[in-house]
Every structure is written in C-alpha cells, then in structure tokens.
Amino acid sequence: MSIAGSSRSGKRSDGIQGLSGWKIQWRVVDALTYRELRTRVGEVRGGFLGVLLQPLGLLAIWMIFLSALNLNRGGSLNVVLFLTSGIVLFSIFSHIANRSVTAIQANEALLFYRPVKPIDTVISRTICESGLYICCMFIMLAGTWIYLDQVVMSDLGLFLISLLLAASLGFSTGVIFMTASHLVPAFGQVAIWIPRILWFLSGVPFRYWVFPAWTRPFFVWNPLMHCIELNRKAMSDEYFTPDANLNYVIVWVVVQTTIAFWIYSNNERRLLTL
Amino acid sequence: MIRVRGLTKSYVYQGSRSVIFKNLDFTIATGESVAILGANGAGKSTLLRLLGGIDLPDSGTIETDASISWPVGIVGGFQGSLTGRENVTFVSRIYAAKKDIPSKIRYVEEFAELGVYFDRPFKTYSSGMRSRIAFGLSMAFDFDVYLIDEVTAAGDQRFREKSKRLLLDRKQRADFLMVDHNLWGLKLHCDRAFILDAGKIEEFTNLDEAVAIHTERLLSGTVSTHPLSPDPSQVPSEPVT
C-alpha cells in the first residue's frame, strides 16, 4: 500500500485546496451523478439496459392507454412522435421535480463531505433524469425513422432547445421543491401533486386547442405546454400549434431559475444545519 | 495554520436551545498536533465537525491555509445502498485527480481487507468493517491536517495496531487534531492539548499536565458533562464570515 506523499511544505495532490470553485463544482456533480446512476442501475435487473427499459415501458403503456381512449390526435405529426414528445418532456420535468423533494434525505450521508451542497444533489438528478429520457427519445426517433422511413426532424436546434428548457424548468422547480419541503416537511406531500395537475395542463396526450376556447387560458400560461408544443413543431414543420412561444418559455425559465437560486441561497445554511 | 475566532455553536431541540460552546478562540500552528480533552458531551466531536466543515457554527470564523480532512473515525459519509467500492469511488471523484482515483480505491481495498464484502452494500457491513473502510478511506488522501475522532477505540486488536502504525507514519508529514478517550494514544501522537469544559477551552503546552488535570477532574466529578444551559439571548445569529 502506498499513498502519494509529500512534505508539509510541499504541494498536496489531494483535496480541493487550490482548486477553482468551478472545478470543485464539477467534481462534486460528477461524483453525485455517478452515485445516482449506480443507485438507479443497482435498483433494477439488467443493468443500464434495464434502467433504459423502464421509461420505454412507460411510454409503451401510455401509448396503448391513450390510443385506446382515442386521444392521440397528433394532426400532421406522426402519433408515436406526438406522444413521445409529450411523455418524454413531461417526464423529464416531473421526475426532476419529484425526485428533488427527497434529494437531501437521499443524499444526507454524502453531505458529510464539505464540498457537497444540497443544490448539487438536484443538479446531478437533473443530469441523470434528462440524460435517461433523452436517450429514450432518440431511441424512439430512430425506431420511427427506421420503421416508417420518415424524416422526423425539421428543426434540430429548436428540438434541443425545447429539451433543455424542459430540463431547466424541472431543475428550477426542483430547487424550490427541495428547499421548501426540507424547511416545511408537509410541503413535500403537496409538491408531488403539482406535476400531476400540470400533466393535464401540458397537452401531453392531446392537442389542447381542440377544446372549447374558454379552456385555453388554463393551458397557455403553462411554460411546459409551450416546451412540448415547440418540440413537436421541431419534428414537423407542418405541425399546427397556435400559441407556442419560445421567448415566453425562455423568460419564464430565467425568472423562475433566478427565484429558485434566491430562495436556495437564502436558506442553504438552514438546509445544512436542520 | 488554523485560526479560530469567536466560535459559538448551539443546537435547538424541541424549541429549547443548548449552547455547546461559546466564543472559542485558539490558533494551531503548522507542525503542531493537538489533543482535545473533555468529558462526554463537552463538544469535542462538534468542534471537529465544525473544523471539518460538516457542520456550521452559529457565529465565528475558522481560517486556515491547510487542507483539512473530514473527521476520521466517524462512520458517516457512506451511502448504505452503495458498495464499499462505490462509496470510495464517490469520495475519490471529489478529493482526487482523475488519474489518481484507481490508486485510491486500491489503497482502501488493501487496507480494509474486506475481500468480497468490498463489493457489497455498505449497509450490510458490521461496525468493525465500517471502521476499517472509514479509516482506510481517510488515510488514502494526503491532507495537511487530519481530524481524528476516537479512531484508536474502533475495530479489533489487529486493526488498532495497524491504525497506530499508519498514524505514526502519517505524522511525519501531517498534523493531527485528536479526540480520544484512550489517553495513551493521545500522548503518542500529540504535542499539546486543549481541555474543553463548560463551553470554554483551556490551552496547555504540556500534554502530560493537561491529561493529569483532565483525569483529576473526571475522577473528582468537577467536570461539566453537559452542554451549557439554554441561553438563547446570548447566541449570536449572524452568519459566519
């Protein structure tokens, strides 16, 4: 056994002393992402493939269910892509938000290490959930492309931005959920219902504008609905969506993320000492 | 060098605040190893947690130019669902350069001698196995100052001997802040001592003298075994600077 030794006056190769804040942040998020993936992989049979099959299975079940209800009106967009877009983007948002409620509790032992801060647990969960569901999305896109021999992308930039915005919405919501539910545990019980309500207001299985006009305000305020519709539009230029507005989502994400950071930074000390 | 100024720590339990210590001031120079003596509940482990950055003080500052370990010996910092190897990998990804991660894992694996258990969930380990991996993990990293909490009391005879040898070796290039009820172990590794009693700290340059006074107080029952009485009005609430 040996360890890289050095004299008292010499430079240490270990530890975080002398590293920049970004470098420390990178190492912590890298380590927590590793921990998240190991736990996810360890929970299911079949390793990483098993982890990937979970959301794919979920997608399949939703598609059978929604097809049976004849709610799969995708218009000019292929119905598989229409549902994949809604389910994947909503899952990215809701999984990040829901898993953030328990992020501190689940990583309590690892907050033992000084560089690890509560917000890092949400960042790593955002990376894991987004990565997982984006992999699923590309599998579905590839499958559709091979099976239907149909071009499934008209605006790759918009497609990627809509995914990024859905993850950012999940992240900022997750930071607020984590902070609030740790300071007021009862909030954790309420928080898990919020994504469930949003599911109906995001146009996941249907095009919201086919409903009566008076219902429109319930959908149009919701930035996640805009993300999903923009994602669908990115896959088919002919897809009709009357209200989707990229600028609206960007402004919402910036404002919500700023609020989330403000709430977190004002309470980080309490999260670490409660 | 570690410089502590005005360090105050209290805990709130069921609406009642208990002050552990108040306005501690001390400086530890580079090259000094210090024993922290005190009765159970005097706040020795709390002080190590603050110095290690695991907990935050109510007020006061801790300034240092040294890299300080987490408290060695406390079996915290391990995720029960992860294996020993995965836990070690997690910590190595934070505290070591990428190229050094495999050597850190190998070091802990060889030191802990857990065999196949190294790849089993941490929650299945016995307390002795946990101590071995916790101590091995701490020693795998090259810190300037090690915070050592009751490590000589953990594990079996063979592990204690192995730990003792490793600490003596590490003492050649690092300093220790030690909490241990094994006073003989403190004498072996430390140069001077602090006695933490009734929320205050007394500094001794002579370790033997400190041990004698501490022992006498313990035996005569004149030592405080509980945190300071609740005194919320005296606890500053401003954040650490």
Image (cartoon, rainbow, N blue to C red):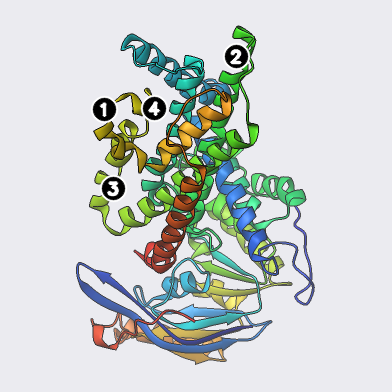
Which mark's residue is nearer the viewer, 3 or 2?
2
Mark 4 closeness class: few <14, some 14–19, many ≥20 residues within 10 Å? many
Q: Which residue is mark 4?
A: A204
Q: Is residue A229 visible to the viewer in this orientation of the structure? A: yes
Q: Chain of mark 3?
A: A
- Tell me if mark 3 has few (under 14), some (14-19) or many (20+) residues whose alpha carbon lies within 10 angstroms of its own: many
Q: Tell me if B91 is positioned left or right of B42 in this view.
A: right
Question: For the residues tagged 3 and 1, is the chain the same?
Answer: yes
Task: Inspect the image, locate mark 1, and give the three-letter code of the amino acid beneath it.
Answer: Pro
Numbered tag placed on residue A143 in the rendering: 2
Residue on which disc 3 sits: A188
> Separation of disc 3 and disc 1 at Cα?
34 Å
Q: Is residue B235 left or right of residue B212?
A: left
Tag 3 and tag 1, C-beta contact below 8 Å: no
* Relative to B142, A124 lies left or right: left
* Among numbered discs 2 and 1, the one appearing first in the sequence: 2
Q: Secondary structure at mark 3?
A: helix
Q: Which residue is mark 1?
A: A212
Q: Residue at x 60, y 79 (%)?
A: B190
Q: Give the spatial CA distance, label 3 vs label 2.
A: 38 Å
Q: Position of residue A34 (x, y in %)?
A: 59, 42
For numbered disc 1, what is the local secondary structure?
loop
Residue B155 visible to the viewer: no
Q: Quick one: quadrant of the N terminus of chain B? A: bottom right
Front residue of A52 and B85: A52
- What is the three-letter code of the residue carrying label 3? Gly
